[in-house]
């Protein structure tokens, strides 16, 4: 009876210590007497009790938030920058053997790299060329973490906190830029209008009848306003003989 109980307890202990079940996104790095065998999983894993030891590693994509870092840009502006990093473990054996705690190591490396890259850029570049900064951060982090069996997928700058004085200066600069553009647009409109008026004057000079047509059109526009102004149109051509006679008489008198 005692022997049967001992056998049952041994079987239960063996099954409890030997059988492991890993999820689809998990891998198990097995150490046998301190030496790495291989990464196993997913599914049912059988270990040798006491001899084998297994560490689980998640293969899912990890989103790590980088704490805000105080950065002095290339043009000596003090800002605070934070970012988010997306990475995953592609080699679970290296992630366990090559680095003690890859999550902590990734966090520290991301903070120092963020300060270094942002410190080499000017403020305008930091605000307008985020894709370039993100690419530089991703490339540097991926190069350093490749020996750890980690792949950095994406790095994104989340927020750039500027001092209040710099925000006011940038607001004034933006307002001045908008006023400059408005003046340029207004001057360009005046230039185009003057060019069109010059073209119209040339046409009227070649064809004087166009002036009378414009005169009639103006009268039509004035009549559409329903005002009390009374207009008597009178052809200018009727005055031309009289004007010629007056000009002839003045010229004769001046000749005398």
Image: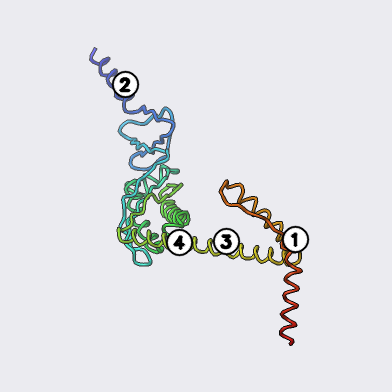
Q: Residue 189, which numbered label?
A: 3
Residue 185 place in picture, x, y as percent: 53, 61
Looking at the image, tell me whether mark 4 or mark 3 is earlier in sequence order.
4
SS category of the residue bearing label 3: helix
The residues tagged by marks 4 and 3 sit, at their Cα atoms, a distance apart of: 15 Å
SS category of the residue bearing label 1: helix
Q: What residue does disc 1 label?
A: 209
Which is more foreground, mark 1 or mark 2? 1
Looking at the image, tell me whether mark 4 or mark 1 is earlier in sequence order.
4
Looking at the image, tell me whether mark 4 or mark 2 is earlier in sequence order.
2
Question: Can residue 109 be seen by looking at this rendering?
Answer: no
Residue drawn 37% across the image and 46% down it: 97
Residues at circles 2 and 3 in contact by the CB criterion of under 8 Å:
no
Q: What residue does disc 4 label?
A: 179
Residues at circles 4 and 3 in contact by the CB criterion of under 8 Å:
no
Q: Could you tell me how many numbered marks the image carries?
A: 4
Dot 3: few (<14), some (14–19), or many (≥20) neighbours within 10 Å? few
Question: Can residue 150 be seen by looking at this rendering?
Answer: yes
Q: Residue 229, which numbered label?
A: none
Looking at the image, tell me whether mark 2 or mark 3 is earlier in sequence order.
2
Residue 68 place in picture, x, y as percent: 31, 52
Q: Residue 11, which numbered label?
A: 2
Looking at the image, tell me whether mark 1 or mark 3 is earlier in sequence order.
3
Nearest the eye: 25 or 249:
249
Q: In the image, is 90 to the left or to the right of 99?
A: right
Q: Is residue 243 above or below residue 61?
A: below
SS category of the residue bearing label 2: helix
SS category of the residue bearing label 4: helix
Which is more foreground, mark 4 or mark 1? 1
Residue drawn 29% across the image and 17% down it: 8
């Amino acid at each position: 009876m005692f022997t049967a109980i001992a056998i049952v307890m041994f079987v239960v202990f063996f099954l409890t210590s030997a059988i492991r079940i890993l999820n689809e996104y998990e891998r198990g790095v097995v150490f046998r007497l301190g030496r790495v065998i291989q990464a196993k999983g997913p599914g049912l894993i059988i270990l040798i009790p006491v001899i084998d030891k297994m560490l689980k590693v998640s293969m899912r994509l990890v989103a790590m938030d980088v704490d805000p870092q105080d950065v002095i840009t290339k043009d000596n502006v003090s800002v605070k920058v934070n970012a988010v990093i997306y990475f995953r473990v592609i080699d679970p054996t290296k992630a366990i053997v090559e680095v003690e705690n890859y999550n902590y190591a990734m966090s520290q490396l991301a903070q120092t790299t963020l300060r270094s890259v942002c410190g080499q850029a000017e403020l305008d570049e930091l605000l307008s060329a985020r894709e370039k900064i993100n690419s530089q951060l991703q490339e540097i982090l991926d190069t350093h973490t490749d020996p750890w069996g980690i792949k950095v997928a994406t790095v994104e700058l989340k927020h750039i906190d500027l001092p209040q004085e710099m925000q006011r200066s940038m607001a004034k600069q933006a307002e001045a830029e908008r006023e400059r553009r408005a003046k340029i647009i207004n001057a360009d409109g005046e230039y185009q209008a003057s060019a069109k008026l010059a073209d119209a004057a040339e046409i009227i000079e070649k064809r004087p009848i166009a002036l009378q047509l414009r005169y009639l059109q103006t009268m039509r526009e004035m009549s559409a306003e329903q005002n009390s102004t009374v207009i008597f149109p009178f052809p200018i051509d009727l005055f031309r003989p009289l004007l010629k006679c007056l000009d002839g008489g003045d010229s004769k008198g001046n000749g005398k």
